[in-house]
Image: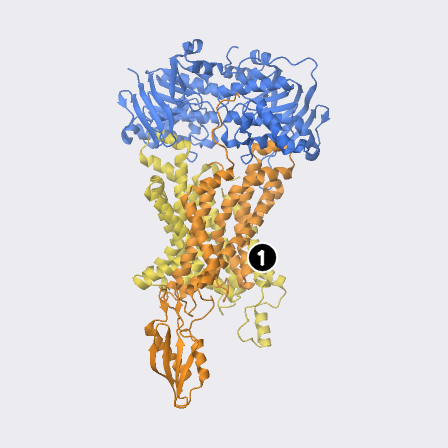
Chain colours: A orange, B yellow, C blue
Amino acid sequence: MSAAATPVEDGASLLARARRRLAGDRPARAGMAILALLALACLLGPFLTGHPYDRLHYDYPATRPSLSLYPRPDAVRPALDRLALRMRVRAEDVAVTPEAVRLTLVADKPVDPRVLTFFARSDTFGEARILGRAEDGRRLTVEAPLRRLRFLAGTDTLGRDLLTRTLVAGRLSLALGLLATAVALGIGVAYGALAGTLGGRIDAAMMRLVDILYSLPFVFFVIMLVVFFGRSVALIFVAVGAVEWLDMARIVRAEAQAIRRRDYVRAAEALGLSTAAILRRHVVPNLLGPVVAFAALMVPRVILLESFLSFLGLGVQEPATSWGVLIADGARSLESAPWMLVVPAGFLVSTLLALTLLGERLRVALDVRA
Amino acid sequence: MLAYLLRRLAQSIPTLVIVVTLSFFLVRLAPGGPFDLERPLPAAAMENLRRVYGLDQPLLVQYGRYVAALARGDLGPSFSVRDLSVAELFSRGLPVSMTLGSLALLVALVLGTAFGALAALRRGSGLDHAVTTLGTFALTVPGFVVAPLLQIAFGLSLRWLPVGGWDGGNPKNLVLPVVTLALPQVAVVARLARAGLVEVVDRPHWRTLRSLGLPPRFLALHALRGAALPVVSYLGPAAAGLLTGSVVVETVFGLPGVGRYFVDGAINRDYTLVLGTVVLIAVFVLVLNLMADLLCALIDPRLRDFG
Amino acid sequence: MSLLALRGLTVRYERAGVTALDGLDLDLARGETLALVGESGSGKSQVALAVTGLLPPQARVSGSVRFDGTELTGLKRPALDRIRGARIGLVFQEPMTALDPLFTVGHQIALPLRAHRGMSRRQAAARAGELLGLVGLRDAAARLSAFPHELSGGERQRVMIAMALAGEPDLLIADEPTTALDVTVQAQILALLADLKERLGLALLFITHDLRLVRRIAERTAVLRAGRLVETGPTGRLFSDPQAPETRDLLAAEPAGRKGPVPEGAPVVLEARGVSVAYPGPRRWLRADAPRLAVAGIDLTLRAGQTLGIVGESGSGKSSLGRAVLRLEPAAHGLVRFEDRDLTGLDRASLRPLRRGFQPVFQDPMGSLSPRLTAGEIVAEGLRVHEPHLSAADRDARAAEAFREVRLDPAWRHRFPHAFSGGQRQRIAIARALALRPRLVVLDEPTSALDRTVQRDIVALLRDLQVAHGLAYLFISHDLAVVRALADTVLVLRDGRAVERGPTDSVLERPREAYTRALVAAADLAQA
């Protein structure tokens, strides 16, 4: 063969090259690893912490994060005293072992065994068992196991386990981020591709609309929307998607137009390809890179926007929770329980950072020109 | 030039009309009203109130009245803060928000350009990476996380600065809100300035300038003017970002600004206050965008086709 | 003693593993013109950058560059800045981008005057005006306040030269100063450089890929290939008696030979009458400006096996005409007949089945291949439309066949376009057109982005394919040398109108119109 020299490189497909570039890219790998861990934790974590996310622990309001088990030995006696007060008895002969507490309930009248349900209802003790009675039931010797609890990330002011709540909140934030991005992606790509492909006056009109919408203070519209039409997750989702599609539409339209002006599209037209075939085989595949990269960067923005709304008290409502809600709670208890801010904020920030990192590396990896 | 300015202003009128219309009907179609209290008012009193505020009229009539009043510059009375008009509320809130916003913008422009220029000068160095990395942090960590953290650090632990409040615009009270507001903007400006400088330096004309053996001050003029373009075009989006940020900052630091009014107004169904705020913000963003465009044309002669 | 002396100049890019210049020895005396010739990648531009200390930071330089007794390699910034811009002036290729778009022309010319000659702003402005006059810019004083985008390419190049001369240098380095310009402008700039050199007693280092320019301007010529000096000597001797095979190869790269005659009674393939293209004017507030007529009433007739060369400078409407013939130009009017079908008024759908008969090849070998498809898919794409009954394997076989026909290894058809060089991509584009077995191919500057040696091969390929398949070519080009080698008849286009037409030899050798004469004179065709 005469045509000089061999090709200058091996010529794998762009996707294959992008995949190879990403795999060799340490920041991108780190981002992916962090995201995978976070997603896994949010999905499975709530089953492993041993706490339902909405269970209130009255004995442990605003407990600081720690690895140790509760109750602490020195906390058993005060808890017992509080319990005794509510049972209208005195606690005597208290003996605390690491697993259980044994004591005698003393009262002026015979002690009604039904008061023992107070034990089970408390956060410190389990089901109590009567070991013996004396003085016509005025002295009741009972044994109750200690409820051994661990709050790795502490509890909130209502005594709910913060780690469980944060992980459950993460499910919502992540799901919302992905879904709203998908919505924005769908609308934006369809709108942008249509405008860019049709061109001419329709395109001008469509983009004029986008320009007008773009110059609106959109976050304020979203706030209005959620305030006036109730604070449901679905609405937030629509609102966020409605804001973000504008960017997508602009990008897709600009790219579609640029691609349509390329000689390879002209050549395809000269080959006799129909408009639909040109769109399918030439325009859409070449749009993919910028769209994917932009979508990856949209996910953290959506999560941020949701958190922002929730932070203002306009987003997700109790008992459902999201990171924004938790951070708002934390900001209110700043002085007494700073971990209530730090823990969810840490999760939110690491998610945002990982997503941003990944998105930016993806953009580089998918760049045709690079 | 003047014609261009007038035309641009005229072009923004449809945008404003859309903003007003959309907001008006959005607000009105929502369930609930400004006089829905915990305990319902007697029917007669309610009727009376609605008549006084013109809420008994058909919606379209109300819309017409509102737009007509707006055209005269009348934003109407506030529903939630009795005896005060929306304009009066703004005259109290705007100085607060404007002070915060302009200070933050100033900080962002000065620091951002400085950081961006440093990073661009030492491209690929540790400093460059540090600026880029810190920028990513500043951009991703949201204001509602930064603000409480600053409160913990400088207000509660170190006790250097107050954790909140306005205190008549005491500079000490301004520090933390302005820092919170400026932080992401500093990052964006730094990024834009760096990218702008790097792009200038990569262009063929830079090689021409260097081939002339010019002293650094000559080169700096050309580099900065080239890099100013993306920074200046960012003014509009920056304004929007600052507005959004001010809602958070005013909430966290308990400042009596306009952003706070908006959220409260929305919650209290204060129709006129919400609409007034939206109009105010829209005008503000439009004006800043226009200013950015004019500045860009000043910097770049190729954009001076005002035809 | 020579003004500029390079000894063993070597430039390496360690990370890329590239040696751009390899032990270059070169001398340039005062007042002498030396041409440095080479194809892309020969390292010729690296010389200009190495001399002026403008190489990118990752470049490793060794050897010696002595300018008037001063060693320039390793020279620190302030000392270097006293030489470049002051004693060495540099003119670059890109007239579009080599000037700062944000500053007036006057400001930019004044820069070296203020920096090196200690002039005040006012003095510098006055001198800048004189310099613009010196480089032959009309209405020089008024042009001082113009911005680069308000000037034409040729005017910008004059401004560049004025800037380079502002410091009153001893040496002017011109790196492809005319490559991006139209031929007539090219000739003017070249004349200007020669004139300035005489008047100011400059030494000129003229860097180019174009041997024809060399012959006109240089006393001595040095040929570079792959970073090495291949041959150097007096220009006349180098042309008449080249020693190195590389030099001979470069000289032989001039497209030569003539096309054979069109067979008697060949059928008419294309007939166009009154083809016009009118682009709508820029949209203003509520009204549109008058439409711009890019092509104004052109008639064409083309027979099988015939090549019609469409010649014109940028903006002459030649590409619009090509698109109009292909029915790819929505703004086109006029009658187009292809073989026995009238294409006028056919809508897209009814045009589609006919399209296989007439195919385009575009100029930009980067932009004309979709980066997401393999070369084989690109070549076989038209078969999906026109021969839908073919199986994937059949299509692939046809693609392989087309690859062989354009002399590419069929095994490469599974690679993506970015893996190929410019010349290889152009072959793929030709293969794509050929796969449909068309009767007419519209070639829009197919060789303009390629090096001369690659150009020669593509021209030979096109000629062979024409004979083998009896193709009719509409060959659009600004390059008269290539047109002469390929075309039977020539149509000269200017501002959308036909200036002159006729058999190639008579038009190029005995042009009747002044414009054609200027074109031919500027092209300076070698005798062949």
Q: Residue A258 appears at what percent x and percent y?
A: 55, 37
Q: Residue C483 appears at what percent x and percent y?
A: 56, 18
Q: Residue A229 appears at what percent x and percent y?
A: 56, 63
- Residue at figure coordinates x 56%, y 68% from the top left: B33
Image quadrant where residue C464 sits: top right
Q: Residue C179 appears at what percent x and percent y?
A: 47, 23
Q: Is residue C74 visible?
A: yes
Q: In the rendered view, tell whether residue B59 sits above or below residue C182.
A: below
Give neighbour class at mark 1: few <14, some 14-19, many 20+ (Cα, 10 Å).
some
Image quadrant where residue C310 sits: top right
In this rendering, position of residue C297 left or right of residue C45: right
In this rendering, position of residue B109 left or right of residue C264: left
- Residue at figure coordinates x 29%, y 21% from the top left: C66
Q: Of residues B193 and B294, which is closer to you in this image?
A: B193
Q: Of residues B129 and A48, which is closer to you in this image?
A: A48
Image quadrant where residue A56 sits: bottom left
Q: Is residue C494 visible?
A: no
- Tag count in the figure? 1
Q: Which residue is label 1 attached to?
A: B21
In this rendering, position of residue A241 left or right of residue B90: right
Find numbered disc 1 in the image and state the secondary structure of the residue it sits on. Answer: helix
Q: Of residues C145 and C277, which is closer to you in this image?
A: C277
Q: Which of the chains bears the disc numbered 1?
A: B
- The amino acid marked with disc number 1 is Thr
